[in-house]
Amino acid sequence: MSNEALNKPIIVWMNHDQIALDAMLNTIRKMVLTRTTMQKLEELYDFRSIVVSPGDNLQEHAYKAIEDLHNNADIILIDLSFGSHKLPEEVFIGRELASHLARKFQKSAVGVYTRFPIGPRESSIISSDQFAVVLEDVRNAYEGPQNLRLQGDDWHSLFQKILRDAQSRARAFPPSLTMGYGRGITRWAIGQPRNRSVSFRRAACNLVDRALDWLDPAPTEIIISQIGEGFSGSFVVKASAPTWPKSYIVKIDEDPDKLIEEIKGYNKVRTLVNHEYYLPLLPSNEGSLVTLTPKWWGAFAMEYDGSSRPLIEYSTLTGEQLAGIYRRVWDESLSSLYGEVSIRDVLLSSIVSSEAITSASEAWNSLIRYTSRTDAFNSQLKATLDQFKLFLDSSSCISIMSNYKLKIPQVERVHGDLNCRNILYDSNKDSFRLIDFPRVGNSDCLAVDFVKAEAELVLIMMDSATGFDIDIARIAVWEELVKALSTSFELTNRSIPDVESNRTLIAVIEIREIFSKMSKCNGQTKLAYQLHLLATILPYLEYPDTTVPKKLLAALFYPLAVIFQV
């Protein structure tokens, strides 16, 4: 950032009064380091003065004036008393300007100064801004009585400390944590967020602020709360304000590229799905992606009715109620998205790739230490775990799968990520909305959305509300469910004593029945379903959001019979 030709740090001083600014800088520039090098400060620092007139566009003009230097400033010092010599009345003009520039020039150290004393009230308020430096009564510091005046060595020490502190902050945090907070009007609701990611906690305020900066009139405060638990870097938050008639949803992801694809999907789905069944993008229903950096942390906004929650959070819904919601998702929404069902010949390796098997094998090896906890399980369960490991390590299995062809039920497009976090349900209105359309427009197997819904019900939603999803001993209870799911495609009239497992089973039975009816026996429908289920399950062994017991469960929730059929 420094002037490379002179190798000097650039220090920008900003005021509304050219005469006062020149008088101050002319004095400071000429000060000498008498205790060390005898150099003048102007030999060590590139002092720049910027004069900006107060007015409605003060922040915009100040920003442009610094950008016009073509060299980012190392230190930016703003006069607190912009437009008046009266304090405390005018102190907040300079303070707000400094806060704005600190957000805009995040690699610069931004401080404030004033030629006048600051009262206790103003001093306490300014201290909360955490500026790089606050220079009070600065006139005495450069031309006051000898006992109050800063000498050249003192100014040099001050500037060096500011620069060192700025460098330390830059090294201490990743970019997402040093991005500031946009306009500074967004804050978390009490008790929020639920996710403990420090990066997400700080990035979200900034991203929501930016994603909603088009609102007119602009709010003075935005309160956000998390309504999506967060899975593999993806989060959903609700934004509201006391003066707003409605709330908004903001989708946030560590990877902005994922959101770019999602916005493309939303723009395609507008002509394919009734508007009642998805959240429209904002502004102007086209969506606008905001990011902290080009490749890290992004967000976009959607409309929201204010009372829906992700389906995963409805722990009190019965199996029949869950089944009814999923039936409506397909009958009322996704059936119009899919288009015609046809038959297509595909290589099995295009469904379950050797790379996916290798990755799953590596992930399983990291879980071996937990299998000792399954000693109390019955021999059949332990044998299934051993068989799963054998399958992952079998090169012959990969070879067979690479050469095998099957006929699958193909549709024109799919949702692409139909999980229990992307279905927003309003229990009061008995209505639902879908979010997250990353693969809309892609022709794919009809089974893709169905197996994703099934896998999520078992590996994420089941027991997430009870807390038993982190208890390895619970696998012995889940065993009956996954045994039923993995050994037979038809599950009609099955029931399980365990309440949580049984409600999951009822919902999965409905999902599979809907698939069978929609596929209309186009191709090898059951085998296609089970192979896509296998392909969907394998990555859960790697997902950091999947609990260890559920990763072990994934090994059981695996249609071994499918491979034997092949």
Image: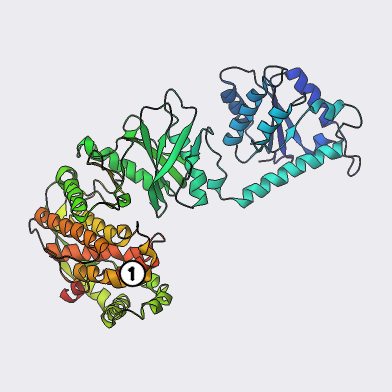
**430 shown above or below 447:** above
* Quarter the C terminus occupies: bottom left
Left or right of 530, for residue 543: right
* Kind of residue at disc 1: Arg
Label total for image = 1
Q: Which residue is disc 1 drawn over?
A: 474
How crowded pointer 1 is (Cα within 10 Å; few <14, some 14-19, many 20+) is rated as some
The residue lying furthest to the left in this view is: 520
**562 shown above or below 520:** below
98 and 26: which is toward the camera: 98
Q: Quadrant of residue 146?
A: top right
**What sort of colour scheme is used for the picture?**
rainbow
* Image spot of residue 367 (x, y percent): 40, 73
Disc 1 is placed on an element classified as helix
Q: Is residue 293 visible?
A: no
* Image spot of residue 119 (x, y percent): 74, 26
Q: Is residue 50 visible?
A: yes
* Quarter the N terminus occupies: top right
Left or right of 378, for residue 147: right
Left or right of 343, for residue 449: right
**Residue visible at 11% across and 55% down?**
519
**Residue visible at 11% across and 64% down?**
493
* Image spot of residue 344 (x, y percent): 14, 58
